[in-house]
Amino acid sequence: MSDPLLRCHALTRRFGALAALNGVSLEVEARERRAIIGPNGAGKTTLFDLITGELTPSAGHVEFAGRTISGLPPHAVARRGISRSYQRTNAFRHLTAGENLRLAAAAGARENFRLLAAPPPPASTSAAVREVAHAVGLGARLDILAGRLSHGEQRQLELGIALATRPRLLLLDEPTAGMSPAETQRMVRLLAALPREVTCLIIEHDMDLVFTLADRVSVLHHGEVLAEGLPAAVRGDPRVHEVYLGSGGEA
Ligand SMILES: Nc1ncnc2c1ncn2[C@@H]1O[C@H](COP(=O)(O)OP(=O)(O)O)[C@@H](O)[C@H]1O
Ligand SMILES: [Mg+2]
C-alpha cells in the first residue's frame, strides 16, 4: 500500500478556551473518497481550514504528498494541488460560466500538477474548460453569465472552478447545502462521476449522499474522531447513532 496522500497528525486548533479540533489524526489514500460527518460545531470546517492553510494549527501538522504543508499560506497550499469548494459562491457573477472556468484553469496551470498531466498550454485551455464544463453538467451553459445561472447551476460552476485548477485533492464543504431534491440528485451524479485521480474529502449532512459516494467515513464529534471506517460499519456504530444519526441527521 502506498503512502497516504493526506496525513493529519494530531491536529488541534483552539479558539480561546474552545478546542474546535482536538488531536485529530486522519489519513486519506490517493483516489479515496472520504466523507467527514458530525453534528453542527463538531470541527469539520475547521479541519478544512487547517488543511488549506486558512487557519494554522495550535498543535499538530498536515502532510500532503509526503511534505508538510502546515504553515504555508492558502495560495501555496493551492499550488501544491489542493482545491476547495466553498458553500458561498466564488464565481464572478458578471463573467460567463466559461470565462469563470477559463480563469480558474489559467490560475491552476502554473505548477505542481504533474500527477494528472503537464500544465495545459493556452491553445488547449478551451478544450480543458469544455471538459470541466461537461464534467459539472454545464457544457451547454458556457455563455451564460454566472449571476444568471440557477442556484444549483451556480454550485455546479463552483465545483467546476475548483476542478479547473486540476487539483489532486478536492475539499467539498456541504456541496448540496440549500439545494432542492432535484439539484441534490444532479450534484450527487456529478460527484460520483468525477475522475478517480481527484481524491475527495466531502463534508456532508445528506446521509444518502454520504453512503452513495464515500469509500470511508470519518465521524467528528466535539473536535475528535469518534469513529472511522466503511460506510456500512459507521452506519451501524451505536456511538454514531447516539451523537449523530439518531439526532435527526443535521450536520
Ligand atoms: N473563527 C472562530 N472563532 C471562534 N470559534 C470558532 C471559529 N471557527 C469555528 N469556531 C468554533 O469551533 C467549533 C467548530 O466549528 P466548525 O469547524 O465550523 O464546525 P462544523 O463545520 O463541524 O459545524 C464551533 O464551536 C465553532 O463555533
Ligand atoms: Mg461547517
Image (tube, helix red, strand yellow):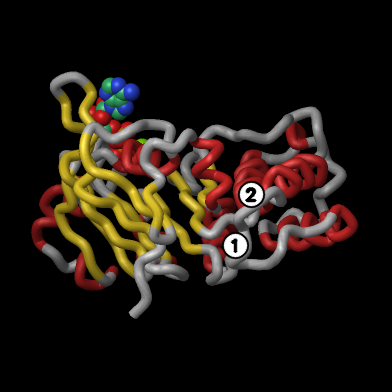
Q: At 60% from the left edge and 34% from the top edge, which residue is drawn?
A: 89
Quadrant for residue 72, please give it.
Answer: top left
User: Which mark is drawn over residue 125?
Assistant: none
Q: Which amino acid, mark 2?
A: Gln
Give the x, y percent position of residue 36: 32, 53
Quadrant for residue 230, please give it.
Answer: bottom left
Quadrant for residue 50, please give it.
Answer: top left
Give the x, y percent position of residue 53: 42, 37
User: Which mark is drawn over residue 190?
Assistant: 1
Callout 2: SS: helix
| The quarter of the picture showing ligand 1 | top left
Q: Are marks 1 and 2 in contact (CB under 8 Å)?
A: yes
Mark-to-mark CA distance, 1 and 2: 9 Å
Q: Is residue 195 above or below residue 145?
A: below
Q: Which amino acid, mark 1?
A: Leu
Sort mark 1 into few (<14), some (14-19) or many (20+) by Cα contacts within 10 Å: some
Q: Nearer the viewer, residue 235 or 102?
A: 102
Quadrant in which the C terminus appears: top left
On screen, residue 119 versus residue 62, left or right, reads right
Q: At 66% from the left edge and 46% from the top edge, which residue is drawn?
A: 161
Q: Nearer the viewer, residue 167 or 249?
A: 167
- Farthest residue to the top: give it: 16
Quadrant in which the N terminus appears: bottom left
Which residue matches tag 2?
A: 156
Q: At 40% from the left edge and 54% from the top edge, which residue is drawn?
A: 67
Mark closer to the chain start, 1 or 2: 2
Callout 1: SS: helix
User: Is ligand 2 less than 8 Å from the beta carbon at label 1?
Assistant: no
Residue 153 visible in the shown view: no
User: Is ligand 2 less than 8 Å from the beta carbon at label 2?
Assistant: no
